[in-house]
Image (tube, helix red, strand yellow):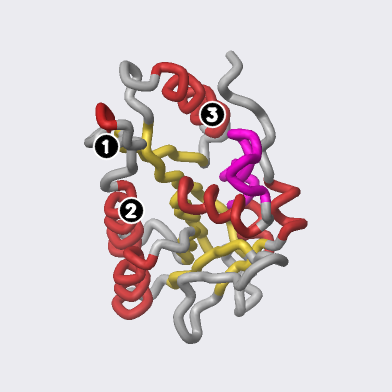
Amino acid sequence: MHVSERVIVYIDYENARRGAREAFNQGWDAPPQAGHFDPLAVGLKITEAGGADGAPRELVEVRVYRGQPHPEKQSGAHAAWERQAAQWRRDHRVRVVHRVLNYRGWNDGERPREKGVDVALAVDFVADAIRGRYDVGILFSADTDLRPALEFVREEHRCRAEVAAWRSPFQRSYSLAQRGMWCHWLDEAAFSAVEDKRNYVRP
């Protein structure tokens, strides 16, 4: 009897959302919800596809990392964010990890930016490996700042580090996979299956 490998999927959400818009030619003139996807659906699709060894797998958690609009500075965006996060959290396997957006330059017309989200993801990816919380940790992002975390888990621990990325029909596809590292490629059909078209701006 084979014991299923425990899988945790770590999603750098804004990075992956922007990547979906670009990979599938949705463009920045697309509606605000374009590029959004259901993290649990992504986690299940990746887990069910399995890895190189063909061993059975079980999704135990999907961790979503993203910036959160400030309720006073962006009340509408904050409310939409909360509605979306609440929808995700309906399944106990989804954990949303957030940090409030950085509003430096906000009064001068600059857009708010994420700050510390990638660091939080990297820390958890490494810490969970050390604690033995997963057998396979899958990182979904194209942010090269996360490579050291992947390298640490791959080189220092018995658990495996894998990555996920969109495969675009319009442009060169990119992933954080290093030599010998398994990449879960998600094409346009896969994106259509996990896409979230709901408009969370509306109550």
Residue 84, label in figure: 3
Can you say whether 77 is above or below 13 in the image? above
In this picture, residue 70 sits left or right of residue 20? left
Residue at position x 45%, y 24% in the image = 77
Query: Residue most toward the front?
Result: 108
Residue 102, label in figure: 1
Foreground: disc 2 or disc 1 = 1
Q: CA distance from mark 2 to mark 3?
A: 20 Å
Residue at position x 51%, y 23% in the image = 80
Q: CA distance from mark 1 to mark 3?
A: 20 Å
First along the sequence among labels 1 and 3: 3
Q: Residues within 10 Å of mark 2 (few under 14, many from 20)?
A: some
Q: Nearer the viewer, residue 13 or 101?
A: 101
Q: What amino acid type should be assigned to the residue bearing mark 3?
A: Gln
Q: Is residue 102 magenta?
A: no
Q: Residues within 10 Å of mark 1 (few under 14, many from 20)?
A: some
In this picture, residue 147 sits left or right of residue 32? left
Q: Position of residue 146 (x, y in %)?
A: 35, 64
Describe the element under mark 1 as helix, strand or loop: loop
The residue under label 2 is: 118
Instruction: Provide the residue span drawn in magenta.
Output: 26-43
Q: Position of residue 135 (x, y in %)?
A: 46, 65
First along the sequence among labels 2 and 3: 3
